[in-house]
Image: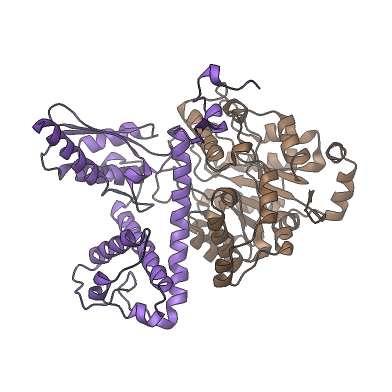
Chain colours: A purple, B brown
Amino acid sequence: MATASVSDSRERELWRRLGEVNDPELDEPITEMGFVERADIIGDGGVEIDFRLPTYWCSPNFAFLMLDGVRKALDQLSWSPAYRVRLHDHMFAEEVNRGIEEGKTFGDIFAGLAGDEDIGALRETFSMKAFKRRQEAVLLNLRRQGLTDREILGMDLAAYDVARLGPGDAAKQKATYRAALVERFPARRQGDPLFVTWEGQAIPPMGLDAYLADLRAVRINMEFNGALCRGLKQTRYKELEVIDGEPTLVDFIMDRVPERSAPAT
Amino acid sequence: MYRTPEGKDIFVVDGHTHFWDGSPENQKNIHGKQFIDCFYAYHTGLSPKEQLWEKGKFEKYSADDLYRDLFIDGPDDVAIVQSTYLKDFYKNGFNTIERNAEVAKRYPERFIVNGAFDPRDGEKALEYIHFLKETYNVKGVKMYTAEWNGASKGWKLTDPDAYKCFELCEKLGIKNIHVHKGPTIIPLSKDAFDVHDVDHAATDFQGLNWIIEHCGLPRLDDFCWIATQETNVYGGLAVALPFIHSRPRYFGEVIGELLFWIGPEKILFGSDYAIWTPRWLVEKFWAYQIPQDIAAERGVQLTDEIKEKILGLNAARLYNIDIEAKKKALASSPFSIAAE
């Protein structure tokens, strides 16, 4: 009994940690994107992760950033296990796997191939995009709640923390924007304005429409990747889609249905 | 010709089509297999269910499939077939100009065959451009900056070797440069299909038209900015358009941005056949309206007049197609008769 509950709680902890790693380009948890194909705790407490991206061609630097995130997440596990992370079916799987295992930087792994690759600048770009996307969600939500632009832009962190943002994804969006804001501006205090630009500038109420247009452009780009990745991943992983309990045409085409039950054509 | 539910005939130029061979027999290595698998994933990921093809057919379809899907079942009047060589991945190339010219030969009035070259080949690339002009009289080329070539995993439009090629294109009257700027995949560089090189190339080569396929997505804002500044930069809708089925509201946001920034004269329809077939795309596009709130925010509308431009008039202008003359020539073609 005791053993079972230990392994259960470790498993929960493992998935919780993995769920904190985001696809940097999409700002979505890798667990929700389905990139973690397998996460097992083996006999001695060691952890084995199988990781697979939507296509063989996904940018290797994105793969690196995610696997680096996975490595950091595993380092935080309470029982400090040995672990093994494998990237599958990727054009640079071998190089990335070897490098991650040896704790190398991206530049080391792809020395000679990556050119002037600056992974630090890339991380920063992704943080900015995530900040903007999360901020837009909250701004639009507050407008939907009926607040005026002046009221919205006058909010401070203290008012935000007690505000209710409505049903659906709102609570999650509220928390993720707060996290992005505090990460960007660690010295933020409760009385400081809730909404500033990535550069820390105030947003004038008159300029909110134009500012939102800029944020929308960021979201459109990120959503494109997100929608594409989801579509590709679904096909690649050959997830069975069942409508009214019957396999669909996709399943027949993807050869997921046993021969004898296939319809005569 | 697409006939609208109201009975109006719309002239359709499909700006982006392929006649490829991605079959296992033609694959040179694992990359060749993964490349066509990725295309197939696009196909299955974004097509309506009733439009799905079997894998085997998708890897290698026949010339008759293409004629039927584009011109008989499909609404295309003219199709621009793009060439993509990928000789590092496929024994005979993926869709070379030889293969495209062969499929076009039977119905020349229906096709515009575009060439392709790789500036990294240096002098050979220049010779090859001469060959393309003399042999096929090409009016356009397709550039694939992420293509591998030996140790190189990609190039930029602003590379000195590329500029020599574009100078020659301009001199020979190869005016339409289609550039693949799409989803973030290979090569290694942090933004594999970064669109900023378009800005410089378009400024430096005012006599050429730069058609950015996939509108630079997922860098739509960068693309819009550049296309707004540069009068000779256009956007091809391939890959963006299929979202009209799976995520219509999202498509509304994309087309809303394009109309707001670059306007209705510079957007070109393309099916990306055989990843998608043109019939359902054109039908859905004609029936489509931008959701009201998005249209109001951006102050744009997708009127019938604008749709007609996007579906054919804009591309006809770039390729000097005399629409009335073309309609007459096509009226007696076997496809028009078969479609009756």
Q: Position of residue B10 (x, y in %)?
A: 78, 54
In the rendered view, tell whether residue B100 sits above or below residue B295: above
In the rendered view, tell whether residue A196 sits above or below residue A265: below
Q: Residue at x 72, y 60 (%)?
A: B309
In the rendered view, tell whether residue A13 sits above or below residue B106: below
Would you say B158 lies left or right of A1 here?
right
Would you say A8 lies left or right of B72 here?
left
Query: Which residue ends up furthest to the top in the rendered image?
Result: A260
Q: Position of residue A24 (x, y in %)?
A: 34, 51
Q: Residue at x 16, y 40 (%)?
A: A9
In front of the other: B79 or B334: B334
Q: Residue at x 33, y 41 (%)?
A: A112
Work out which quarter of the rendered image holds the C terminus of chain A and state it: top right
Q: Position of residue B163 (x, y in %)?
A: 56, 53
Q: Is residue B207 visible?
A: yes
Which quarter of the figure has residue A175?
bottom left
